Amino acid sequence: MTPLERAFEQWDLLLEVTRLRKEELTRERGGSKGPLVVGEEAQELFSKAACVLGRVLDRECPLPKMVFYPAISQLKGRFRRLSLGLGASLMGISGLVVYMVSVGQLSVTEGYYCALPILFVLPFPWSLYRRMGEYMDRGSYYLQEERTVVIYDLPRGRFLSYCAHELAFHLLMVEGPSWEFYGWGWARGVQRLVSEKLGEGALAASLELMVGELRVALGWLSREGGKPLPSWVKRLPSPYHKPWWSAFWSGQKEITYSLLGRALSTAHFQLLEAQDGPGVYKDYLDKRVDERWLFVSSDPREWLETGD
């Protein structure tokens, strides 16, 4: 039986799991907003997430080094200054246009055409800040060689959720059976469980990424297997289907393969959890999960390379 045939045996269950996660996200939506984490608060929340992770997996979670980078606060300050400078310049130009119209050096129509570009340029800094802010709002990653978590000054709920994800990766690197491929889905599932315990909007941030990855997995499986994709799946909220994602990552083959690998891995562990319960994450860490690879037997990026 091919990997796709094994996947389609679980197609209906995967759709049901995705629907449940989407309903959870709808209930939690908006909870991940709030003020940015600052200063010593970052280390306190990092330690809190580690404690909850330890309780969820029934083991002590060793704390890796954390590098806290206030990138979003710095970005906001820079764009505020840019907006003020640009706004002052455009107001000066607008005043000059109004003056020239009033003294008859420009007709009203000419003044209108001079002012029109200003109306388009004026909101540019805010629009650019918003797009870059959305991109940086996904800002956390794990440095494998240094065993270090790097995380930005995110809103409190999102910060807690991302701490849970990177701590799960760290734990998998320290004592897990493997972090490659299936580790992605394992960490995403653990992130959701820990975020649920943490509260403070952390669950919404976790579900946003999980639902987006499930949408990617369902879309790819639908295309490969000729399975019709329900319309509600196409409308699922997803950070991977937004303009900022396309602007930064479109055309980068390795990024696309990496996303597909994460998506199928997430789908795999969500199916395992649906069948065996949340204990499957602890079992995987204890190397007690059997070889029921419901989705794939190897990294799906290899399928894309070979065309199999």
Image (spheres, rainbow, N blue to C red):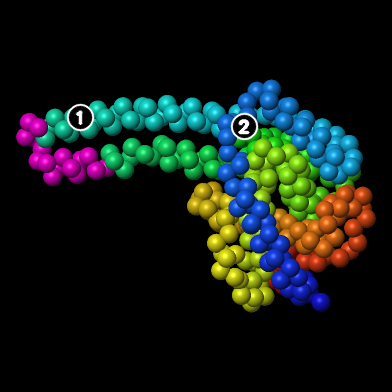
Give the magenta range: 102-117
Q: Is residue 306 left or right of residue 114?
A: right
Residue at 43% across, 41% down: 127
Between the residue at mark 2 and the residue at mark 1, the CA separation in whole angstroms equals 39 Å
Identify residue type, mark 2: Asp
Residue at 68% across, 25% down: 41
Q: Secondary structure at mark 1?
A: helix
Q: Which residue is mark 2?
A: 153
Q: Tell me residue 266's x, y (percent).
A: 73, 56
Q: Which residue is mark 1?
A: 95
Q: Nearer the viewer, residue 28 or 231?
A: 28
Residue at 73% across, 48% down: 192
In this view of the protein, can residue 153 be seen by the observer? yes
Q: Nearer the viewer, residue 33 or 100?
A: 33
- CB contact under 8 Å: marks 2 and 1: no
Q: Nearer the viewer, residue 123 or 145?
A: 123
Q: Secondary structure at mark 2?
A: loop
